[in-house]
Image (tube, rainbow, N blue to C red):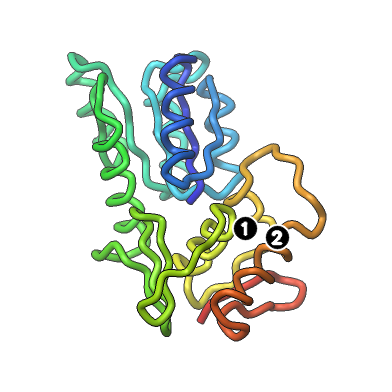
């Protein structure tokens, strides 16, 4: 899952990024509103964490621009505890949820999982297909009830494909889901992850759609 983090506080942003990476997310962190908006409009993210007190464009302006351009990515806004008017305005502009600072990281993780499940039309946590079961919260995968050890990058590839079961996911989107915005990626890195997943979970699970990408189901 790929997260856009829009937060200008370096300490909070660094802590949030570290916590999200530990939860298995890929995080692209931007420190001003204009960069955050450009990224959200140009790239595919699973969720946006949006601080309202951003320089340049503030968070409400970013949110308004996203919704005006019909971007329906889930948005979780971060607000000061006493900023009730901003929370209400954010929800009116199309935010999906909010947290007031300071907040508990476990609560943030739970809110993110809930919003992402809702955006994919799911009410349950587990992702299942054939004999494969993936638990995003526990970061575990099993086949036929037996746990299978995956690397974090393999887990991210599999999760993205299972979240979008039946749809072809492009190479570029998978690479961005696994590595983020500006990482240097080896030319065959994604193919290596897919090869390893097929070895561990079965050759028929992940289909290659020549010239387009990969799909499950």
Residue occupying image coordinates x 60% and y 46%: 43
Badge 1 is on which residue?
A: 174
Residue occupying image coordinates x 41% and y 19%: 12
Residue occupying image coordinates x 27% and y 45%: 110
What mark, if any, has residue 190 been given in the picture? 2
Vertical relation: 209 (above or below) 79: below
Regarding mark 1 in the picture, which secondary structure is present there?
A: helix
How many numbered callouts? 2
Labels 1 & 2 near each other (Cβ < 8 A): yes
- Residues packed near mark 1 inside 10 Å, few (<14), some (14 to 19) or many (20 plus): many
Q: Earlier in the sequence, mark 1 or mark 2?
A: 1
Vertical relation: 37 (above or below) 1: above
Vertical relation: 42 (above or below) 144: above
> Is residue 62 visible to us here?
yes
Front disc: 1 or 2: 2
How far from the left and from the top, in percent, is residue 41? 56, 42
CA–CA distance in space, label 1 to label 2: 8 Å
């Amino acid at each position: 899952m790929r997260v856009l983090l829009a937060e200008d506080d370096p300490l909070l942003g660094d802590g949030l990024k570290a916590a999200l990476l530990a939860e298995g997310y890929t995080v692209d962190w931007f420190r001003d509103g204009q960069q955050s908006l450009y990224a959200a409009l140009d790239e595919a993210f699973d969720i946006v964490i949006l601080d309202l007190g951003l320089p340049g464009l503030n968070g409400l302006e970013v949110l308004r621009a996203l919704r005006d351009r019909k971007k329906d990515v889930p948005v979780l806004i971060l607000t000061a505890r006493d900023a009730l008017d901003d929370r209400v305005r954010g929800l009116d502009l199309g935010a999906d949820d909010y947290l007031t600072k300071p907040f508990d990281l476990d609560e943030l993780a739970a809110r993110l999982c809930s919003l992402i499940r809702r955006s994919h039309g799911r009410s349950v946590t587990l992702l299942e297909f054939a004999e494969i079961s993936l638990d995003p919260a526990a970061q575990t995968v099993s086949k036929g009830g037996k746990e299978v050890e995956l690397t974090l990058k393999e887990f991210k590839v599999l999760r993205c494909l299972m979240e979008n079961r039946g749809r072809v996911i492009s190479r570029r989107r998978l690479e961005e889901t696994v590595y983020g915005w500006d990482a240097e990626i080896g030319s065959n890195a994604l193919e290596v992850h897919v090869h390893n997943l097929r070895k561990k979970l079965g050759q028929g699970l992940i289909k290659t759609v020549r010239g387009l990408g990969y799909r499950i189901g």
